[in-house]
Image: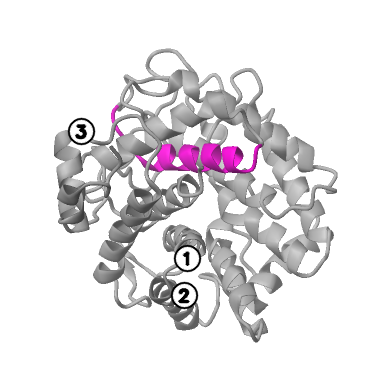
Amino acid sequence: MPLFRTSFWKAMTFPAILLAALQTGVYAQKTPDKKEVLNAMRITNAYFMQKWPDVAKPIVTERERPSNIWTRAVYYEGLMALHAVDKDKNQKKKYYDYAVAWGEAHKWGLRNGVKTRNGDDQACGQTYIDLYLLDKKKNPERIKDIKASIDLMVSSPKKDDWWWIDAFQMAMPVFTRLGVVYNDTTYFHKMYEMYADTKYQQGGKGLFNPEDKLWWRDKDFVPPYKEPNGQDCYWSRGNGWVVAALVRTLQVLPKSDPHYNEYLKDYKDLLSALPAIQREDGLWNVSLHDPSDFGGKEITGTSLFVYGMAWGINNKLIDEKTYRPVLIKAWNAMIKDSVHPNGFLGYVQGTGKEPKDSQPVTYDREPNFEDFGLGCFLLAGSEVYKIK
C-alpha cells in the first residue's frame, strides 16, 4: 500500500514517516507516490535552506569561495526544478525568494567577471535566466552579465574551452537558453562547435567512446589509462553531468536545430549503457566499469541518471518498459539508503574528478560541498514526480 494511504501513516509527521519507511522496507520496487516524492524533495531542501539562511555567505572548505560557484549553482538548478513542480503557493514563493536573494546578493554576476570562459563560473547563469523569465517585468539586469560573458565566447574563434565533460552541464544550458530568449541561433552554433571539440578532439580522439557509449572525464583518463580491473575509467558523476546537460539542452533547443538529433542520439546512447551496470541495490558505483575501485553507494551520479531516464519517459523519448524499472529501483534506493529523517543526504561524493576523490563516501559523512548533491537529487525528484 502506498505511503499516506493508511491512518498509521497519516498520523505521523513526514520525518517520522520517512524513518518508519526506511525501517520497514516499505519502499519496495513500485512507482513512488507523488506526495511521497514531493515530500522527499521538500524535507531535503528545507534542511539545506535552514542550514544556509544567508544566501551570500561564502563557502569555506580548505579555502573561502563565493556562493555563486558551480556547486551552489547546481543546487539552484534543482531548486528551480522543485519550484516548477511544487504547486503550493507558499512553498513556491519561498523557493523563488531564496533564489532571487541569491542572484541579488551577487548582483547577478559571475565569480570571475564577464570575461571568464570557464563553464563553472557560468553555471549560475542557468538560474539567472530562469528567474529572468519568471520575472513579470523581465528585468534585464538579471541576465546582463551572463549574456555578456557568453557573447564574448560566441564572437571568439576559440572552441576548446570544454576540456572536461562536467563543463557540458555547467554551460550548455546557458547557451541554449540565451539562444531561445534572444531568438539567436549563433548561440546554438557556438555551443555545437565546443561540444564537438570535446566529443571528437579532446584527449586526442575525443572524450566519447562510441563502443561503450560512455564518456571519459578528460584527457587524463583516455586509454591507455585503465582502472585497477583493466577496464576504461568512466566516472559516474561525470557521465551524469553529460546526461543532465543533454536533458537541459534538449528541453529548450528547437528541434529544427541541425544538431538536435545528434544530441538526442548521444543522450539515448549514454542511457543505453546504464541498465547493465546498475548495482543490485539500485544505485551506481562511482566507477561505472570497475566496482572494485572505491565501489559502493553514491547518489550524485545516480540522481543524474534518474533525472535523465525519468525525463525521457515523461517526454516519450525512450522505451518506458526498459527504463522505468531501472529508474524506480534507483530512486527507491536513494530514498531508502541516502535520505536522513532530518533531510540530510548521505552517500554524496564530494568534489573531484574520479572515483578516489572525496572518499570515503558514507551515509553519515558530510561531503566538502553538499549543495550540488542536493541539486542533483532535486532534479531527479522533479522528473520522478511527473511520472504517471
Residue 302 against residue 7 in the figure, above or below: above
Q: Any mark on residue 25, and which?
A: 3
At label 1, counting other C-alpha atoms closer than 10 Å, the crowd grade (few under 14, some 14-19, many 20 or more) is some
**Residue shown at 73%/62% (left/top)?**
153
Return the residue at label 1: 83
**Which element is circle 3 on?**
loop
The image quadrant that residue 302 belongs to is top left
Q: Amino acid at mark 2?
A: Tyr
The reply to whether the C-beta atoms of the residues labelled 1 and 2 are less than 8 Å apart is yes
Whether 323 is among the magenta residues is no
Residue 161 % position (x, y): 65, 51
Q: Is residue 83 visible?
A: yes
**Residue shown at 33%/75% (left/top)?**
57
**Residue shown at 40%/70% (left/top)?**
67
Return the residue at label 2: 96
**Residue shown at 65%/86% (left/top)?**
137
Q: What segment is highlighted magenta in the picture?
A: 296-316
